[in-house]
Amino acid sequence: MKILDRILVPIDFSASAESAARRAMVYAQAFDAQLVFLYVVSTAQMALTQPVDGRSRGLERMGQAQERLNRWVEALGFEAAQIDDGSVDCVVVEGDVIKQIVKHSSQVDLLVMRSEGRNELGDWLMGTRTERVLSQAHCELLVLRSEDRGD
């Protein structure tokens, strides 16, 4: 029995997400685990997608997000063949970011994400995304310290 079979890394295309992805790559290699990169197109982003000629641009936006995620993963050093053979999975979904991360956490053994700390009033009132995921995740969670801690 493998200790880790699947590792989830939520992606927002930031430097912090790249750092978390690189750390997850180390774990995936050490445990021969599949990496699952998840990008969530938020419901708010989709609501901004206006119909053109009576046809929704939502599918177009999802396709563009999938292409962007695939390119981002390839830029990390993965080959398209690894994406095609399933050793790396690039998943794009629509919905609430926290709910989708939590939902996908039920399908993996480890979730890797970086803590960004509290920056906005909303974070102070509701907690950071990391805190909200931490309290609801269905798997082990590796939270990496924020890179700009200043200490």
Image: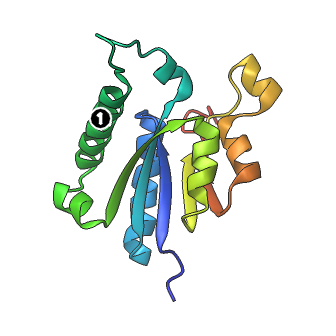
Q: Which residue is mark 1?
A: 63
Percent x, y of residue 115: 62, 41
Residue at x 37%, y 13% (from the top left corner): 51
**Residue 144 showing in the rendered view:** no
Q: Is residue 125 left or right of residue 128?
A: right
Q: Which element is circle 1 on?
A: helix
- The amino acid beneath tag 1 is Gly
**Number of disc labels:** 1
User: Is 151 or 110 nearer to us in this picture?
Assistant: 110
Percent x, y of residue 133: 68, 46
Percent x, y of residue 138: 68, 61
Residue at the far right in the pictured view: 125
Snapshot colouring: rainbow
Residue at the far bottom in the pictured view: 1
Quadrant location of the C terminus? top right
Residue at x 45%, y 59% (from the top left corner): 24
Q: Is residue 16 above or below residue 52?
A: below
User: Is 21 or 137 nearer to us in this picture?
Assistant: 137
Residue at x 68%, y 23% (from the top left corner): 119
Percent x, y of residue 67: 25, 38
Q: Which quarter of the figure has residue 83?
A: bottom left
Q: Residues within 10 Å of mark 1 (few under 14, many from 20)?
A: few
Residue at x 17%, y 61% (from the top left corner): 81
Q: Which quarter of the figure has residue 104?
A: bottom right
Q: Is residue 136 above or below residue 92?
A: below
Q: Is residue 46 above or below residue 3?
A: above
Residue at the far front in the pictured view: 54
**Residue 106 showing in the rendered view:** yes
